[in-house]
Amino acid sequence: MYQGGITSIVSSDKNITISIADKLGKLHENSNIKIYYRKRGEYIRSILISTNYPEKILDLAELISLSSLVIFHLPIELSWMDGELAMLIDAFNIHNKIITSNLDIIKIKKILEPLGSFRQFELNNDLNKIQEFKEEDKGLVYIDRVFTVKGVGTVVTGFSFTNVELHEKLIALPYNREVEIKSIQVLDEDQKSVGSGVRVGFALKNVKEDEVKDIMYLIKHDVKFEKEIEGRLVKYPWSTLNQGQNHVIIKGHSISVNIKLNEGKIKITSQYPIPIIDSQIPLLNVNVKQGKPRIIGYIIL
C-alpha cells in the first residue's frame, strides 16, 4: 500500500522555488499548484509549489496546509514578503527547514525568534538531507478536481490523509452525502487501498458529476464537522484584525468565514461545514493594503 509525505517549497523568489522543486522531484502536474513526485518503493514524496505569490496568498496557504514539511528559502536581502511568509508558516505550526545563501544564523534567529514554530528550525542547505515524513491519519481526503471519464463514471482527485479501501463508504462534504469508492488509482495504477500522504484518483459508484461538482472533502464517518467553531485567537502584533469576512485554511481549501470576538474568544461562522481535524487553524485577511501582513494569526480550538 502506497504511503507518502508532502513537502511544500516557499520563497519570495519564484525562480528559486522552481529550482528547488526541480532538484527534489519530477514535475507531474502543472496548474495553480505544481506537483512534483519522487517515488521510492511504496513511499511517494510529493513536492508542492505555487508561483502565484505574492499576488494570491490563499493559493500558497492552501498548499502549505497540505504539507507535513515546509522548505523555506530566505534571500540575502529580506523584504516584507519574507516576513509574511514566515508568519504564514508559523500559523500552521508545521515542521520547517530553512535554506539560505549567506544569511548569518544569528541574524536569522533574531528575525524569526518571535514566531514560535521557528524556535527549533533546521538550517541546512543540503537538499539530500530532507527528513521523510509520513502524513498523520486525519480521517479525510482533500479533493481538488471532479470530472467524468467515459466508461468509468465520476472521478475525483486529491490527496489522502487517511487509509482508504476499495468499496469503502465515505461522507462527501459539503453535501453530507455518503459515497462509495468504486476504484482507486495512484500514479495511473489501480490499487486496492491507499495510505496517508498520497496523490489519489477515486472513481465514485453511482454518482453523477453534477451531484458532487463542488465537493471539497471525503471524510470518515467519525470525523466531526461544524459550520460554527469557537476558540482562542492568537493574533500577531503586526497584523490588523477586522471583524467580519476573513478566511480560514483547512487542508487544501480556503474557507470564507465571518468572525466575532467576545471576551477573548473568537467565533467563526461559515456557510460550508468545516472538518474538525486540527487544533490550530490559520486566519487570514486578504483585503489589507499591500505590504501589510495578510496573516492575522491562528485560532486554537
Image (cartoon, rainbow, N blue to C red):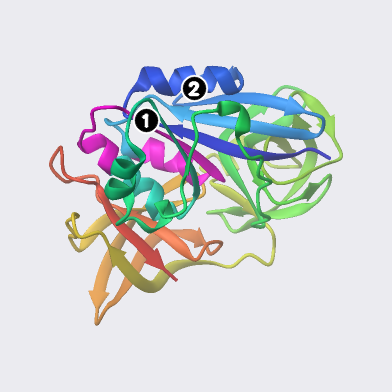
**Which element type, helix, strand or loop, lies under badge 2?**
helix
Near-viewer residue (226 or 123): 123
**Of the residues shown, which amino acid type is indicated by label 2?**
Ile
Left or right: where 165 falls relative to 18 = right
**Of the residues shown, which amino acid type is indicated by label 1?**
Ser
Residue positioned most to the bottom: 263
Near-viewer residue (128 or 173): 128
Q: Are marks 1 and 2 in contact (CB under 8 Å)?
A: yes
> What is the magenta range?
58-83
The percent position of residue 118, horizontal first and vertical second, equals 41, 51
First reached walking from the N terminus: tag 1 or tag 2: 1
Residue sitting at x 27%, y 78% = 264
Residue linked to disc 2? 20
The percent position of residue 151, horizontal first and vertical second, equals 78, 24
**Counting other residues with Cα less than 10 Å from the Cα at mark 2, is it few (<14), some (14-19), or many (20 or more)?**
some
Near-viewer residue (52 or 204): 52
Could you say which disc has been placed on residue 11 in the image? 1
Residue 67 visible in rendering? no
Near-viewer residue (47 or 170): 47
Give the answer, above or below, for where 1 lies relative to 284.
above
